[in-house]
Amino acid sequence: MSANHHKRDFSANRRLPGIALLAACIGAISTLAAFVLLNLIHLFTNLFFFGVLSFAERSPAHTTLGAWVVLVPVAGGLIVGLMARYGSEKIRGHGIPEAIEAILFGKSRMSPKVAVLKPLSSGIVIGSGGPFGAEGPIIMTGGALGSLIAQCVRVSAAERKTLLVAGAAAGMTAVFGTPVAAVLLAVELLLFEWRPRSFLPVALACAVAGFARGPLFGTGPLFPLETAPPDALALFSCVIAGLLSGALACGLSAALYKTEDLFGKLKIHWMWWPALGGLVVGIGGFIEPRALGVGYDVIGDLLHLHIALQVALALLLAKAVMWVVALGSGTSGGVLAPLLMLGAGLGVVLGHVLPGGPPSLWPLVCMAATLGATLGAPLTAIVFAFGLTHDSNALLPLLAATLVAHGFATVVMRRSIMTEKIARRGYHIYREYGVDPLERHYVDEVMTRDAKTIDAQLTVADTLARYFGPTQTHRAYPVVNGDAVIGVIDRATLERFSAQHSGTGEQAAAVAGVANVANAIASTTTTLLTAMQTREPVFALPDETCRLVATRLAVHGLERLPVVDDMNTRRLIGIVSRSDLVKTSLAHFDEEHKMQRFRRIAARPAKRRFAPARRPG
């Protein structure tokens, strides 16, 4: 068998099948939760705007309340403010930042209150005209359900995170019917790792939700669209569309948190803020009724160019102001649907001037680019736009424009709309991640093989004199009893043991009348085998990753570990220290910082312009 048989592309995990099965169940439950949430939105829309008890899907724009429509969002905001104050403050906001915070700083634990109050509060807010989508609330609700189920079984915090994200991604799949985009959202925003142990359960949960949503919501894309293939000139237009979409994303993010700061300066309790935000929503809805509610019908009309340019501009201005003020007030709602509408509106405007593609292409392109730049998740936005429309001809423009917008946003903005809220609570999130050098290397690659050992039958006094005297060559030595290693000994450990014996020696000397206590201690016959019996030995195996051993050193407060061939024989084959583990970062440092040139382009010799002068004579 090869000496490298223990090295794998991915780490093995025996618990993966069980976690995946649990994630599949969570995917089905999150689909039901999405069904409940959307029906709550329909129920409250009918109650607030039409005064009937019905689950039929209706748009608030068709209400006959007239000027009284201004007070409807105020009532919804007041109810949600009370729910947040006396229920759970976690229901405030658009859901995804709260899920990220629970994952990174709360060991993926969420409360039952959130699972119940989040969909209820979101149904009230959106049903009373709030300009939000259902995706943020269902991500929070699905995540809470996944976390609660995980808390009922014996799992680690990492496995609980996987189940939380599985519920969140499955909820998004159920609402939009975009399972692949939901998986990418999990990878780009929620998991903070790329491992089969987390990716596979989340993907399975999304697949289950994708199949389960058919009987509840129907099949097919939410906004079916087919555009003509773009020509080469469209690349220039994609750059322009990407830059403007990135600027729109940055502007919306800045406006949102500026508005949130203004609300924070108010002298009244935050419980009343959603009602004040609801007043702005009501006024905007009175001026432009189609800006109220989720607005999926408006997004469809924008994508199909069924709205005139002047109407689209008025609608988008009203939607932007209403969304920024309402979300800044701390109410409950999502960001994806408003961003889709605003981005599509920008595309409607640009479709009249951008060359290289049909006018119907640019609402879809700008929709994805704005979403990707705002969330900091470009791959999610690209696949999400395709999943919503199934327009394969738009994939290349989607790729170009979304990546340009994302690049613009990463240069201009320090944080995305998701991480800024968490940063304001005192937590910094670094979203770039790569393969840890300690994960790429194994102990047998960095350990010291010719380790000098000490016999366990040697006395403590002899060990101090022989190995830790003036001629000391190593800071610590493995101790072996026959062929088996029993641990590592260093000067500090031996001196602590001697100090403990010193107290016993002084008492014995006082009884026996011995004057020279030092001689009594030096003449002790205690062996290393006896001295080390109080310490539980800790070992490393050659086929373990450097990351695992580094964690073991940190947990036990050690600086080095003996490396044994297996835990049964404990035959010593080397020793690994902290300095050995640091070596794994050298290659990474060279890749990142060392500038090199391997080839040079030879310069052509200059041509002579004049003939050489003749020699005289």
Image: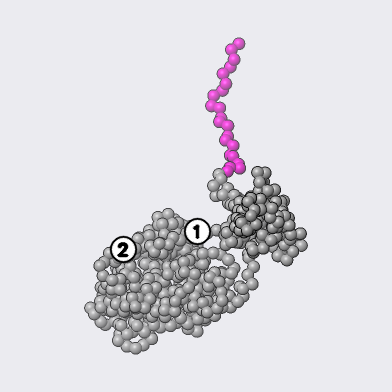
Q: Residue at x 68, y 48 (%)?
A: 465
Q: Amino acid at mark 2?
A: Asp
Assess disc 2: are there few (<14), some (14-19) or many (≥20) residues with their C-alpha within 10 Å of its C-alpha: few
Colour option used = one colour
Q: Earlier in the sequence, mark 2 or mark 1?
A: 2
**Is residue 255 inside the magenta stretch?**
no
Q: Residue at x 46, y 81 (%)?
A: 33
Image quadrant for the N terminus? bottom right
Query: Which residue in the structure is indicated by mark 1?
Result: 432
Find the residue positioned furthest to the front: 513
Image quadrant for the C terminus? top right
Left or right: 318 in relation to 19: left
Residue 392 seen in this snapshot: no
Left or right: 139 in relation to 460: left
- Describe the element under mark 1 as helix, strand or loop: loop
The magenta region covers 596-617
Q: Nearer the viewer, mark 2 or mark 1?
A: 2
Above or below: residue 293 compared with residue 252? below
Instruction: Report the disc number at residue 278.
Output: none
- Describe the element under mark 2 as helix, strand or loop: helix
Query: Which residue in the structure is indicated by mark 2?
Result: 261
Q: Nearer the viewer, residue 284 or 1?
A: 1
Q: Amino acid at mark 1?
A: Glu
